[in-house]
Amino acid sequence: MSTVPTQVTAELFNYLIARTTPEDAFLKELREAAIAAALPAIWISPEQAVFMHILLQISGAKRVLEIGTLGGYSAVAMAQALGPDGHIDTLELEPRHVAFAREWIERGGFTTNIHVHQGAALDTLASLAAGPTYDAVFIDADKGNYAAYLHQTLDMVRPGGLIMVDNAFAFGRILEDQTTTDDVWAIRAFNDLMAREQRVMSLIVPIADGLWVGVKQG
Ligand code: SAH
Ligand code: DHB
Ligand code: MG
């Protein structure tokens, strides 16, 4: 038994994808419409959606906080895991993304389950902080604010709650020797902060662009 994990080659990756629960039909429709509408193609991958669905379902989560809605792909994927009595507050800055997400949330019949809040996430978080706590949080917006989002949301998620944070691999650039991209540096700093955060037991799962998965202690 090696301490270094098996390299996921393209061939092995194709093997496991072929054995992953296929993308939900409505999510596929939403994704294709998002491509047609020229939204940035940076939503979670179908296998990441399956993984997050499993985590949410086994944890029995009912209330989720999402930062970064885009077209609503991940919000809908999570809503499917929560069931009919689930609720998601999802935060999005761009009016065009909000409009697309709201349209598709309605088409999918998730209007009562998913509330899209338009505005800068830090402002919206401040207004939601006084409300009931969440069972899970998914952070997937502007990378420069990841540390602030973690700080703010840690107080909003219940003990035992699930913390998920996207893009731990910084678009695949996390180990580059040199980079001038602010987002990559922001993620490096965030990953180090998360690793030191004693209130969360966590690890980076090597799925898609790296997904932080943690559980709030205490
Ligand atoms: N979670 C989505 C993808 C989110 S992409 C999915 O998987 O389907 C990141 C989103 O964060 C973009 O739509 C971007 O407009 C939004 N965003 C960027 N800065 C933001 C801010 N300060 N507040 C809220 N949303 C922001
Ligand atoms: C980018 C942002 C994301 O959240 C993601 O999952 C992939 C790419 C980006 O800003 O390029
Ligand atoms: Mg992301």
Image (cartoon, rainbow, N blue to C red):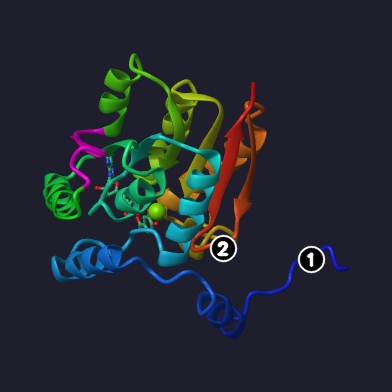
Amino acid, disc 1: Val
Q: Position of residue 16 (x, y in %)?
A: 57, 76
Seen at 83% across and 63% down, the residue is 3
Residue identifier under label 2:
176
Seen at 34% across and 14% down, the residue is 130
Residue found farthest to the front = 84
What label does residue 156 carry, if any? none
> Residue 152 appears in which quarter of the rendering?
top left
Question: 125 and 72: which one is in front?
Answer: 72
> Vertical placement of 114 versus 199: above or below?
below
What label does residue 4 carry, if any? 1
Q: Position of residue 156 (x, y in %)?
A: 44, 23
- Residue 193 is covered by the magenta coloring: no
* Residue 122 horizontal side relative to residue 208, left or right: left
Residue stretch in magenta? 110-120
Find numbered disc 1 in the image and state the secondary structure of the residue it sits on.
Answer: loop
- Residue 111 is covered by the magenta coloring: yes
Q: Position of residue 68 (x, y in %)?
A: 31, 44
